[in-house]
Amino acid sequence: MKNKGITVLFLSFLCALSFFGCSPKQTALTEKDGIWAVYDRECRKCHKLNGKGTIVGRFIYKMPDFTNTKWQDNVSDSRLIISVANGKRKMPGYKGKLKDEEIVDLIKVCVRSFYPPAAQ
């Protein structure tokens, strides 16, 4: 009986994902054209591969350090999505240049991946 309940729950979860349009291609990190390729093409020049950005960028342009726990804790995904779409300070806006899904995935996959793991 317990296994049947788990199976029903799992199938319900899969149905919910397909209903809301969860597409594994949006966040596929291993594909050549995955979201990390977009980060590499559009973001890496300033934010660098490690997410810390350049020293000049951080101190003069107030570019965030994606590895900073305090910053990650205090900024919402929606605020970051708006900043990427519309631009902020020296960063250009990417609305129209990137798909909405790409902007969301840049935040949820790339930017959030720099969040330091919790100490155990």
Image: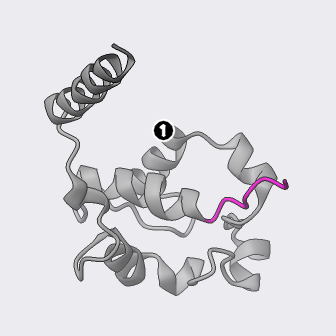
Between 105 and 86, the one lying in front of the other is 105
Magenta segment, prevailing SS (helix, strand or loop): loop
Q: Residue furthest right?
A: 119
**Camera-nearest residue between 92 and 117:** 117
The residue located at (33%, 13%) in the rendering is 1
Q: Residue furthest top?
A: 1
Residue depicted at 69% across the width and 70% down the height: 61
Residue in the foreground of this view, choosing between 115 and 58: 115
115 lies left or right of 109: right
Q: Is residue 91 left or right of residue 16?
A: right
Which stretch did the figure color magenta?
A: 114-120
| Residue 55 in picture, x, y percent from top left | 76, 83
Q: What residue does disc 1 label?
A: 78
Residue 3 position in % (x across, y down) = 34, 23
Give the residue type that dot 1 points to.
Answer: Ser
Is 99 displayed left or right of 62 in the figure? left
Q: Position of residue 94 (x, y in %)?
A: 33, 62
Q: Label 1: state its secondary structure.
A: helix
Q: Residue at x 38, y 60 (%)?
A: 93
